[in-house]
Amino acid sequence: MREKVKEAIKTSYLSIAGNGFLALGKFLAGFFGNSYALIADAIESTADVFSSFLVLVGLRYAAKPADENHPYGHGRVEPLITFAVVGFLIVSATVIAYESIENIRTPHQIPEPYTLIVLVIIIGIKEFFYRFVSKKSDETNSSSLKADAWHHRSDAITSFTAFVGISIALVMGDGYESADDWAALLASGFILFNAYLILRPALGEIMDEHMYDDLIEDIRKSAYSVKGVLDTEKCFVRKTGMTFHVDLHINVDGAKTVKEGHDIAHQVKDQMLHDLPEIADVLIHVEPLDPNLIL
């Protein structure tokens, strides 16, 4: 698990560096190339830097071991950090929308053609970041890293709409100078939609929503592999950061002694922690099954 944390933190550092570099490049290209869509893109990338930094802080805090005041660990800070990332997205979208409307009302020059080349490069880099960070979030079970990945994807979408808007302005000429501003306005809508996509699973995580069917199936399989387990009943899973805590009810022969049932429960726990390293702890409840009902 420690390796997963290190991997997630390294990925966050990469996100911060990449966003900072791209924000500067977009701003310079937008300022000198007369493109507010690119400047709007730079605003979002700047917000990305701060949100990625928040993710980094959250990952470091979530990695702290359980203590007397936090017996389940500190992993629940991850969805809280995700909420903060969503907040950054909403603020970015609002600023971009407001400034886009202001620029649509104000006559300005057609963007320079070279801004299209800049945007193609940016889209490629951002899509790479999205795929890379998303893969790392899946490997580490990190919801805040997943939010960071979607932040990269929203940035790529913003850049794509800017590319379309600038292309329209360059091809159509006079009278279409504000096409890239309309593109930036459209991008703000995409950003808000992505904010919802990021928020929804994080909200489910912090509310302990049932959404781990595949893991529950693996938990039951692991329990059945232990001699003496006749059946499994209730299985509840809660996610805390990159790990899971499990409550499982197992059925054993009712004729067995309390100690025998207790030993079986310990074997189930040990087997589960071995088979599923993403599980941090398991609470086993033993239910006696009437021997007459055992086939």
Image (cartoon, rainbow, N blue to C red):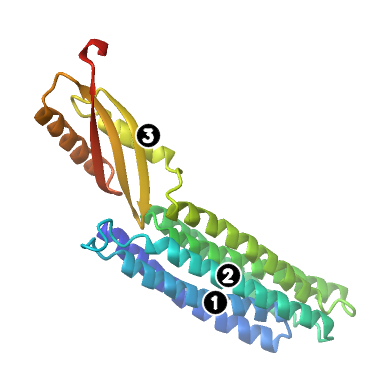
Horizontal arrangement in the rendering, residue 23 relative to residue 110 (left or right): left
Which quarter of the figure is the C terminus placed in? top left
Q: Amino acid at mark 2?
A: Leu
Q: Which residue is mark 3?
A: 217
Against 269, residue 141 (above or below) is: below
Please indicate, yes or no, whether residue 21 appears anywhere in the rendered image.
Answer: yes
First along the sequence among labels 3 and 2: 2
In which quadrant of the rendered view does residue 256 lie?
top left
In which quadrant of the rendered view does residue 163 lie?
bottom right
First along the sequence among labels 1 and 2: 1
* Residue situated in front as seen by the camera: 42 or 59: 59
* Residue situated in front as seen by the camera: 98 or 177: 98
Residue found 78% across the figure and 82% down from its top? 103
Please indicate, yes or no, whether residue 117 appears anywhere in the rendered image.
Answer: no
* Residue situated in front as seen by the camera: 113 or 93: 93
User: In the image, residue 13 lies at what x, y percent?
Assistant: 39, 73
Q: Amino acid at mark 3?
A: Glu
In which quadrant of the rendered view does residue 86 lie?
bottom right
Q: Are marks 1 and 3 in contact (CB under 8 Å)?
A: no
Q: Which residue is mark 1?
A: 47
Q: For residue 133, which numbered disc appears in the image?
A: none
User: In the image, residue 274 lies at what x, y percent?
Assistant: 22, 42
Secondary structure, mark 3, is: helix
Whole-number angstrom distance, CA of label 3 to CA of label 2 = 35 Å
How many other residues sit within 10 Å of disc 2, few (<14), some (14-19) or many (≥20)? many
Q: Which residue is mark 2?
A: 89
